[in-house]
Image (tube, rainbow, N blue to C red):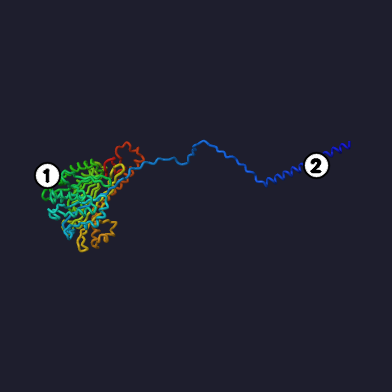
């Protein structure tokens, strides 16, 4: 019994020892395996590349958090063309004036007259002056009053200065009779200019000139000493056979002007005129204010619808006025009663008839038309530049110079025009005389035109933004109080 117990205990010990050895061996193996794994680079396993074709899809971006889009308002009607017309007074060609232009070979060079005004005149879109003489040719003496006839050489200087038109209806236009009227028109046209107021027989009595795309209807009439439809005399000289060469009226029969002018303005508009101007040789010489006949005549022409009235004949400057139609209160006319002399020998002291200094004065009158994108044309601006005729003998030879007296350049007058101190003082006095006559009327015209333009622009802007307000209206409504804007066709001053 004792031997068997001892034998059983031995076996248990042996198994325990084997188990311990196995644990030691396993532990050693694990330690070796860890050391081997640390020292051995792991093998990289290459994964095969798999391409997955996804279906095409439109990705919708979420809307940006901005204000919703707005539609821009349509562009208002706007100015598409402008035309500035410059009008100058009498080229009153007395013999002492054109004799200063005679050259040693007997020819004539009139450029000295326009030496200082050329740059200004040529800067305008369209320029004109009153031709107070005739081109009667060698068949008549070259002289001034009482029967004016000037050498043809004047035309070259007129063209070179930049004039586009000459007014050929005045009380001296018939001084070389009917053939002189015809020859004057021909010489003006040969030089490339328009003659307005006289014409060849059976021609229209008006002209429509296109300036920067604006069609401007123009007509010119003169006072006549007498006329009965068969013969007329413009200056009390031998009557001329009336064959339709001259646009004239008499003070005793102003209805001749009214009847013809009413038909002419209708004809001009039917022919495409978008604005209208009438030039009148009227009034009383040497009077610095217009008379009642001029006022009455101007009002009748305003009532007919003329946009601008430009006067001459008195040989002195007369006032400007803003006229309102008695037929259509929404129509206004810009009027200057007399432009005075552009050049003459009517110097202070030459005649007791001349008011001291005033016959040496003139104005360069400008009026600007604007055409809008809807086709309507308006008078948008008016201005005057005083001029003075300087009889210049500073260099030993006499010249008659037209001097434009631009106030902004007053400090430059002496050097620019070669004036003595006495001449500079005379120029200043001339400026003051002229502005004293036209200043008040000019301001009235300019204030109206500025206000009318501002209201017109306001209306066009409102029309573009709120067209429904005007959809049922046949004509454009009054903006506030001072101007009614016309319908799509027609003009307004």
Looking at the picture, does residue 69 appear above or below residue 284?
A: above
First in sequence, mark 1 or 2: give its number.
2
Q: How many numbered marks does the figure carry? A: 2
Near mark 2 (Cα within 10 A), the count class, few <14, some 14-19 or many ≥20, is: few
**Which residue ends up furthest to the bottom in the rendered image?**
396
Quick one: 66 or 441, which is closer to the camera? 66
Q: Which residue is mark 2?
A: 17
| Residue 401 x, y percent position in the rendering | 22, 58
Q: Nearer the viewer, mark 1 or mark 2?
A: 2
Q: Is residue 389 visible?
A: no
Q: Secondary structure at mark 2?
A: helix
Contact, mark 1 vs mark 2 (Cβ under 8 Å): no
| Residue 137 x, y percent position in the rendering | 14, 53
Q: Which residue is mark 1?
A: 230
At a point 19% along the width and 41% down the height, the residue shown is 263
Residues under labels 1 and 2: Cα distance?
A: 166 Å
Residue 55 appears left or right of 331? right
Q: Secondary structure at mark 1?
A: loop
**Which residue ends up furthest to the left in the rendered image?**
238
Residue 286 appears left or right of 466? left
Quick one: 183 or 173, which is closer to the camera? 183
At a point 30% along the width and 40% down the height, the residue shown is 476
Looking at the picture, does residue 59 appear above or below residue 240?
A: above
At a point 74% along the width and 44% down the height, the residue shown is 28
| Residue 296 x, y percent position in the rendering | 19, 46
């Amino acid at each position: 019994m004792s031997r068997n117990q001892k034998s059983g205990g031995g076996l248990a010990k042996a198994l325990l020892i084997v188990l311990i050895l196995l644990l030691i061996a396993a532990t050693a193996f694990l330690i070796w395996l860890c050391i081997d794994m640390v020292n051995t680079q792991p093998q990289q396993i290459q994964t095969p590349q798999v391409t997955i074709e996804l279906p095409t899809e439109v990705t919708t971006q979420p809307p940006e958090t901005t204000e919703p889009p707005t539609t821009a308002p349509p562009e208002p009607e706007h100015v598409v063309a402008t035309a500035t017309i410059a009008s100058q007074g009498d080229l009153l060609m007395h013999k002492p004036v054109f004799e200063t232009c005679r050259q040693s070979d007997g020819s004539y060079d009139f450029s000295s007259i326009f030496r200082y005004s050329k740059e200004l005149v040529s800067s305008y879109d369209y320029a004109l002056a009153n031709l107070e003489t005739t081109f009667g040719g060698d068949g008549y003496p070259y002289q001034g009053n009482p029967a004016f006839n000037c050498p043809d050489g004047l035309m070259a200087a007129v063209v070179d200065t930049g004039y586009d038109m000459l007014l050929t209806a005045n009380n001296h236009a018939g001084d070389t009779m009917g053939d002189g009227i015809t020859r004057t028109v021909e010489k003006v046209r040969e030089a490339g200019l328009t003659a307005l107021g006289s014409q060849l027989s059976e021609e229209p009595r008006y002209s429509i000139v296109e300036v920067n795309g604006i069609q401007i209807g123009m007509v010119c009439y003169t006072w006549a000493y007498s006329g009965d439809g068969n013969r007329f005399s413009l200056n009390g000289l031998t009557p001329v056979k009336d064959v339709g060469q001259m646009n004239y009226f008499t003070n005793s029969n102003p209805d001749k002007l009214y009847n013809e002018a009413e038909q002419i303005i209708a004809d001009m508009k039917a022919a495409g005129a978008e604005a209208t101007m009438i030039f009148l040789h009227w009034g009383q010489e040497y009077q610095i204010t217009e008379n009642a006949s001029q006022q009455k005549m101007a009002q009748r022409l305003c009532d007919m619808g003329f946009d601008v009235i430009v006067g001459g004949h008195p040989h002195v400057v007369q006032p400007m006025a803003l006229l309102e139609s008695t037929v259509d209160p929404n129509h206004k006319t810009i009027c200057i009663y007399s432009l005075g002399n552009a050049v003459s020998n009517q110097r202070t002291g030459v005649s007791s008839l001349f008011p001291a200094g005033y016959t040496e004065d003139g104005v360069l009158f400008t009026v600007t038309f604007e055409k809008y994108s809807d086709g309507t044309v308006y008078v948008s601006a008016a201005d005057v530049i005083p001029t003075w005729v300087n009889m210049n003998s500073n260099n030993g030879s006499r010249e008659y110079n037209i001097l434009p007296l631009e106030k902004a350049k007053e400090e430059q007058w002496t050097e620019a025009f070669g004036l003595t101190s006495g001449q500079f003082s005379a120029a200043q006095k001339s400026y003051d005389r002229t502005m004293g006559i036209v200043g008040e009327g000019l301001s009235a015209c300019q204030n109206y035109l500025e206000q009318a333009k501002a209201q017109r622009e306001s209306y066009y802007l409102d029309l573009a933004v709120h067209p429904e307000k005007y959809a049922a209206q046949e004509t454009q409504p009054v903006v506030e109080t001072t101007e009614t804007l016309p319908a799509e066709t027609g003009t307004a001053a």
